[in-house]
Structure formats: structure tokens, C-alpha cells
Image: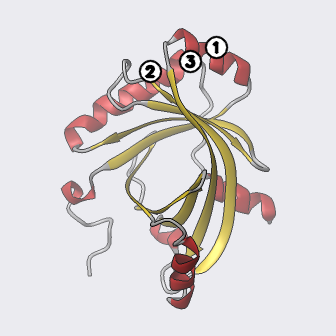
Amino acid sequence: MASSKTQDPMKQYPMEIEGKYRVEDSIALLAHLEKLGAKELESESQEDHYLRHPARDFRITDEALRMRRVNDQWHITYKGPRQEGLFKTRPEIELPLADRSEAGWLRIWENLGFEPVAVVRKTRRVFSLEHFHPGLKVTFDDVCDLGIFAEVECVVDSPEELARAEQAIASAANFVGLHHIEKRSYLSMLLEQQK
């Protein structure tokens, strides 16, 4: 079986592109977003339960599997290996779970040998910069035990959209005063902190 790094890149889409930044002045960031005409889409509570594969080290394959609770709705998400580049660019598959099925899904994963790794909790405000670039969003994350971050992100469906989306993310981040990119995931930061 071919590894995900050698698969046909066309089969890896849609692809999420994301620049993550530590926020030093949240009031200034929100003011910049308002000046740019960002529209707040939602505010939500998120709880991410990450799982460890029984026979595959996700730290080596650069993958992730999580169950995410957004307010009262659960989703399962698979994140594939990151591509080279300034921003975190990786395939992502996310599917909603039926109401009240999350405990059953966790039991299925555990019966298959998956183990819980950690839970990342955060409150998230999502802003649209659709007028800046199609599908462009800025999320404002207050992450328990880690601090405040912003993610400037977009999902693309083809390689042709990738370079334009990367440029839009860099420009939007600059316009709202985000300059210190954070390459680590929230999970990685939390696990490092717990050592």
C-alpha cells in the first residue's frame, strides 16, 4: 500500500491552508478585522479529542484523527500529512456524527485499539474575509492553557487555487497585524507543555 506522501496529489483535495499566529494584542486584532470589513459568522465552544493509532505513529506520518465537539454537534476529522511551504497545507476530511452517537464512536475506536491522546479545549470566533478572497476566514481562538491565537485559513479544491490562496492568507495576516507564525498544532503545544 502506497504511503499518503506518494499518492496522486489530485486525490488529496480538498486541501486546508492555514497560517496560525500567536495574538499579542487581541483588541488591536479585532479592530483591524472590523476595519477590513470582516463579518463575524459564529462564536463557538470546541473540544477536540485526539486519538492515537494502534499500529501507526501519527507523529511520524504527520497525520491526525480527532473527534470534535462544536457546541453540541460532533464531527470526526482526519488530517493528512502537511505539504512543504510557509503555511500548514494538508488534506482534511471532516464528517458530522449523528446526534448522541459520540460515545458509541469512541467505544468503536477504542475497541479497534485507538487510544485517547489529549483533549484541546477552546472558544472560537470565526470571521469571514470573503470579499478579500473566496472562502477566506480568520478564527480567533482562546485555547485553554495555551493562550490566544488567530488562524487565517482557506480550503482549496485544486492545485491551481493553492498559490492564490497562500498569497491571500499572507496579505490578510499582514493587514490585520499578524506577524509571528506558529507552526505547531495546538495538540503539539499542549503535549510539550505537559512534559
Query: Which residue, as the protein is rendered here, is positioned at the far front?
Result: 99
> Closest to the observer: 96 or 192?
96
Mark 1–mark 3 CB contact (< 8 Å): yes
Relative vertical location of residue 164 with respect to residue 27 in this rendering, above or below: below
**What kind of residue is marked 3?**
Leu
What's the residue at 38%, 52% (across, down)? 83
Q: Disc number at residue 31?
A: 1
Query: Mark 2 or mark 3: which is in front?
Result: 3
According to the picture, the residue beneath numbered tag 3 turns out to be: 33
**Quadrant of the image occupied by residue 140:** top right
According to the picture, the residue beneath numbered tag 2 turns out to be: 171
What's the residue at 19%, 55% (across, down)? 10
Numbered disc 2: secondary structure: helix
**What kind of residue is marked 1?**
Ala
Residue 185, how many percent across, how many down?
59, 52
Relative vertical location of residue 186 with respect to residue 116 in this rendering, above or below: above
Q: Quadrant of the C terminus?
A: bottom right
First in residue order: circle 2 vs circle 3:
3
Numbered disc 1: secondary structure: helix
**What kind of residue is marked 2?**
Ser
Query: Mark 1 or mark 2: which is in front?
Result: 1
What's the residue at 57%, 85% (across, down)? 110
Q: Quadrant of the N terminus?
A: bottom left
Whole-number angstrom distance, CA of label 1 to CA of label 3: 5 Å
**Quadrant of the image occupied by residue 153:** top left
Residue 129, how many percent across, how many down?
43, 23
